[in-house]
Image (tube, rainbow, N blue to C red):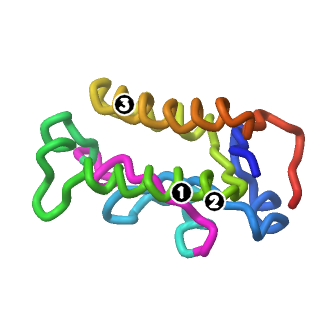
């Protein structure tokens, strides 16, 4: 199954595709109230990518906090765990739906040095899917 890049994930997409895995974005504190995040957070087919400590004004990670940790949380390790799950699903030949618009919005809200890390790592995963020719972008709809 391919990596499917789409603008957004709709409720219809989630309801109609139980076998697909959906990437969503959340904080370590799990206090993101984005509709897609709330729909996917506790589902078996939700694949979180953590991108900040919490949703407060001071919840973004600086590069130092990202690399060195923040209290008992090590953001770089959390991010690497998310990437590992994301990559393993693709290697297992599962359909993974990735919302590009949401990802770009999140990148623009991060500190630039941290967003560059996220962008590069996600680009690596997408490039691997491209190399395998296991990639679909912006199809009108999908159904397993």
Q: Secondary structure at mark 3?
A: helix
Instruction: Give the labeled residue for mark 1.
Output: 88
Direction from residue 17 to residue 96 in the image, left or right = left
Q: Which mark's residue is nearer the viewer, 3 or 1?
A: 1
Q: Disc 3 or 1, which lies upstream in sequence?
A: 1
Picture layout, residue 123 above or below residue 44: above
**Considering the numbered disc 2 on the image, is that residue within a helix, a strand or a loop?**
loop
Residue 15 versus residue 102 in the image, above or below: below
Q: Residue at x 35, y 50 (%)?
A: 79
Quarter of the C terminus within the rendering: bottom right
- Residue tagged 2: 92
The residue mark sitting in front, 3 or 2, is 2
Please provide percent x and percent y for residue 50.
39, 53
Q: Quadrant of residue 74?
A: bottom left
Task: Kindly identify the residue that appears in the image at 39 percent across and 63 percent down.
Answer: 31
Gap between marks 3 and 2 measured at Cα: 27 Å
Callouts 3 and 2 close, C-beta under 8 Å: no
Q: CA distance from mark 1 to mark 2?
A: 6 Å
Q: Relative to residue 15, is residue 69 depicted above or below?
A: above
Q: Secondary structure at mark 1?
A: helix
The residue shown at (72%, 55%) is 95
Residue 45 forms part of the magenta stretch: yes
Q: Is residue 21 magenta?
A: no
Query: What residue is shown with label 3?
Result: 115
Q: Residue drawn 32% across and 64% down?
A: 29
Residue 75 lies, in percent from the top left, at 25, 51
Alpha carbon of mark 3 to alpha carbon of mark 1: how far? 22 Å
Asked if 6 appears above or below 112 in the picture, the reply is: below
- Mark 3 and mark 2 lie on one chain; the one further toward the N terminus is 2
Give yes or no for contact between labels 3 and 1 (Cβ–Cβ under 8 Å).
no
Specify start and end residues of the magenta stretch as a single range.
Answer: 43-58
Q: Are marks 1 and 2 in contact (CB under 8 Å)?
A: yes
């Amino acid at each position: 199954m391919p990596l499917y890049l789409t603008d957004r994930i709709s409720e219809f997409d989630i309801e109609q595709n139980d076998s697909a895995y959906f990437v969503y974005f959340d904080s370590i504190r799990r206090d993101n109230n984005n509709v897609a995040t709330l729909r996917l957070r506790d589902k078996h087919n939700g694949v979180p990518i953590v991108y900040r400590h919490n949703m407060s004004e001071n919840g973004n990670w600086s590069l130092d906090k990202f690399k060195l940790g923040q209290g008992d949380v090590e953001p770089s390790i959390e991010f690497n765990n998310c990437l590992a799950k994301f990559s393993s699903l693709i290697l297992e030949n599962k359909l993974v739906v990735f919302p590009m618009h949401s990802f770009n919005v999140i990148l623009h809200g991060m500190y630039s040095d941290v967003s560059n890390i996220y962008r590069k790592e996600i680009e690596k995963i997408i490039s691997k899917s491209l190399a395998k020719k296991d990639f679909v972008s912006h199809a009108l709809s999908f159904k397993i």
